[in-house]
Image: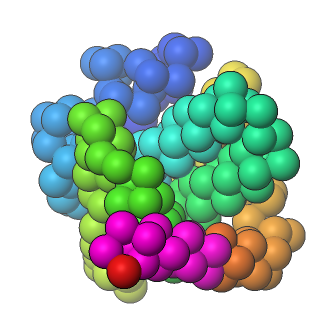
Amino acid sequence: MSSTPSKNWGVIPSVQTLNLSDSMPRSESRIKSLFWPSIQSSSDVDYLGAQGYWVCVAVAVLSFVVFIISNQLIIGTFVLLFYYLSGVGVREGSRYAAGCVSIAYLTDMLASGPSIVKIILAALLLSNFRATWIAANWKPDSEEAAPLPRWSETWTDKFVDKLPTFLWPKLRIFYYILSVCYLTLAVIGLAVLIHQRFG
């Protein structure tokens, strides 16, 4: 069983998230943990939850920037909120949020057209779904599955560890409603696009 990670992770999110800091123990390589993760300890569970959170945050910010450049602030804000709250759910171990964000991104990618960046992000989100599902079923009644403490020493600790824990109980129902609306609109948009192209 891996020991509890030390708090000398640094303050740069990408370093902590991608495990570039040698002080954070991992049972597998960085690339494998991103695209085909496995779980052998509670440290892995926590790491993959944080990794999934950062991936969703990255997708949220990138999508928001694209909509802002297109002068679509309202839609961009809606998309930002959906993907960020999906990340909050992933951080808190919600299989629904992990599955929902994967389906939503794949639908968006099919509607707007694939690119290398979109394919990589879609693969990461699908990997997050797999990791969340495995984590939810990993030794649920064993002492090894006891969650690691959530830290609050740096701003990244507060953003990754404390903020999702604070937000999820308060916004979970709102997220369910938001996600249903988002998926419904995404599916309708994709159906209209397919009809226009092939109808």
Which residue is more in the foreground, 74 or 139? 74
Relative to 27, 151 lies left or right: right
Where, by quadrant of the figure, is residue 129 drawn? Answer: bottom left
Q: Nearer the viewer, residue 83 or 141?
A: 83
Residue at the spot x=73%, y=45% of the render?
76
Residue 154 visible in rendering: yes
148 with respect to 34 (left or right)? right
Asked whether 30 falls inside the magenta stretch, the response is no
Q: Is residue 189 left or right of residue 16?
A: right
Q: Residue drawn at (68%, 26%), measured in percent from left and top?
A: 69
Q: Which corner quadrant of the image does residue 136 belong to?
A: bottom left
The residue drawn where x is 34% and y is 42% is 118
Name the spot of residue 42 as percent of width and height, x first. 36, 58
User: Viewed as shown, does residue 131 lie left or right of 12?
Assistant: left
Location of residue 143 in the rendering, given as x and y in whole percent from the top left corner? 38, 72
Say which quadrant the C terminus sits in: bottom left
Measuring from the top left, give residue 89's x and y in whole percent: 60, 64
- Vertical order, 26 against 141 (above or below): above
Numbered disc total: 0
Q: Main secondary structure of the magenta part?
A: helix
Q: Is residue 190 above or below residue 32?
A: below
Residues in magenta?
Answer: 184-198
Q: Residue at x 25, y 35 (%)?
A: 116
**Residue 184 position within the rendered picture, expressed as x and y whole percent measured from the top left:** 61, 81
Q: Which colour assignment does the render follow? A: rainbow
Q: Is residue 92 visible?
A: no
In the displayed structure, would residue 43 be above or below residue 154?
Answer: below
